[in-house]
Amino acid sequence: MVGASLAGVSTAIHLRRLGHAVTLLERATFPRRKACGEGLFPVGVAALRELGDFESLIEAGAPLRGVRFNAGESRATASLGEEPGLGIRRERLDAALVQAAIDAGVHLRTGTMVTGLHLRAGRVEAVDTAEGPVAGRAFVAADGLASSLRRMAGLDGAMGTRYGVTAHVLLQREPEPLVDIFFERGYELYLTPVGQCSANVALLLRKPGMHPFAGRVREAFIEQLQRHPAFAAGFTLEDAPMVAGPFRRRCHRAWRANLLLVGDAAGFYDGISGEGMSAALAAGPMAAHALHHYLATGSYDPLRAYDAERRALVRNSDLLAKVSLALSRNQAVARYAVGNLARRPGTFARLVAISSGTAPLATLRARDLVALATGL
Ligand SMILES: Cc1cc2nc3c(=O)[nH]c(=O)nc-3n(C[C@H](O)[C@H](O)[C@H](O)COP(=O)(O)OP(=O)(O)OC[C@H]3O[C@@H](n4cnc5c(N)ncnc54)[C@H](O)[C@@H]3O)c2cc1C
């Protein structure tokens, strides 16, 4: 397996539980940072608890009770339900995950970059590392948004033109326990509490919006925050802003013979969706069961079924992102629609519940779309 982050560790632990020997190759050493908004939906917290004892990690994060959309003067809030989500720093989360993988008996090799695939008759026989090839019966690409395994396997699909810039800030006062999303002219800003007076800030921009960041990411990030009313009381930048993208990323399909793509490697819609971590954790058991059946029978049907199941999951979870992206294109439309959502909190709550995986798509009614468009 390649990539020891959420998707890779989740798949690896579930494969171990099914009795398989697993080698996990990871280029990074831990702890390490990762560009991310760091807001985990309640289903993601539940998926995390399935993997091991993460209670002290969850304690160290910040509970998230809702999602708030802000556009000009308009504001709308949706609850995340009974169980809270979690704002959690990736350097802590990812380090705890790799420890859980080791505890589960996964053979983890950090500091090991995979640089090539050995293909024979369409099947992967081994992957290349600086220390030599690593062979196996089946392979998992959990190597993230810019997956090189996806490209090497000829599964790369279309690529978008949006980027994210993220960093941590210290605030003058405790942020509210929700993900605050601001629709601004030319960009969106995500504010997610991750600890005491500490928050993750994610700026999401289309390619032209990235020009001021060229060669001066830190300065441009600070300037953008200084201009934003959410930081009027002041802030201190805690670490260097990190850039991620471009998104969206797609694959033709999430498998090729004995290679399975999991997590962002199988496709990523947009940083604005706020569900990538939950989806990556949830994909683990699905991928592990598909591989287990493939290894037992040699049939590709379980891998095909995994791809279909994954696409259905993503269709739902991308719903809020699609609505958000539509709003981000025009300030006036965003103000109007957010005002409508404020008048129709049930509609907003259903959109969030579907996207966060706690309600099926069928709970969205025609009148919700009317409410979004007209406020009636
Ligand atoms: C700006 C931004 C904001 C986001 N905000 C949120 C949010 O608020 N909430 C949320 O749920 N999701 C968010 N996401 C999405 C989330 O970060 C991803 O969906 C999630 O990290 C996917 O996990 P993964 O395990 O698939 O990939 P990753 O976490 O990217 O991990 C891939 C791993 O593979 C390793 N790797 C890569 N290539 C190789 C190689 N060749 N050899 C060995 N190892 C390799 C990497 O080092 C890494 O550890 C955001 C994303 C972005 C870009």
Image: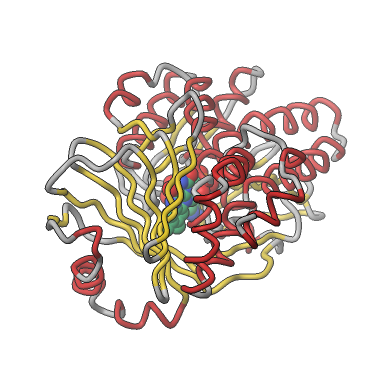
Instruction: Check the image and name the residue furthest to the front.
Output: 376
Residue 113: x %, y % from top left: 45, 52
Q: Is residue 362 left or right of residue 156?
A: right
Q: Where, by quadrant of the figure, is residue 369 drawn?
A: bottom right
Q: Is residue 221 left or right of residue 249?
A: left
Residue 67: x %, y % from top left: 44, 44
Q: Looking at the picture, tell me which residue is in the foreground, 175 or 264.
A: 175
Location of residue 225 with respect to 266 vertically, above or below = below
Location of residue 195 with respect to 144 vertically, above or below = above
**Quick check: can you spot residue 19?**
yes
Q: Looking at the picture, tell me which residue is in the foreground, 214 or 179.
A: 179
Location of residue 322 with respect to 301 vertically, above or below = below
**Quick check: can you spot residue 131?**
no
Q: Is residue 109 left or right of residue 363?
A: left
Q: Where, by quadrant of the figure, is residue 240 drawn?
A: bottom left
Q: Where, by quadrant of the figure, is residue 305 drawn?
A: top right
Number of marks: 0
> Which color scheme does this rendered protein use?
secondary structure
The residue that appears at 73% across and 27% down in the rendered structure is 292
Q: Looking at the picture, tell me which residue is in the foreground, 187 or 58.
A: 187
| Quadrant of the rendering where the C terminus is positioned | bottom right
The residue that appears at 53% across and 38% down in the rendered structure is 278
The residue that appears at 43% across and 83% down in the rendered structure is 208
The residue that appears at 58% across and 71% down in the rendered structure is 160
| Quadrant of the rendering where the N terminus is positioned | top right
Residue 166: x %, y % from top left: 32, 58
Residue 365: x %, y % from top left: 75, 45
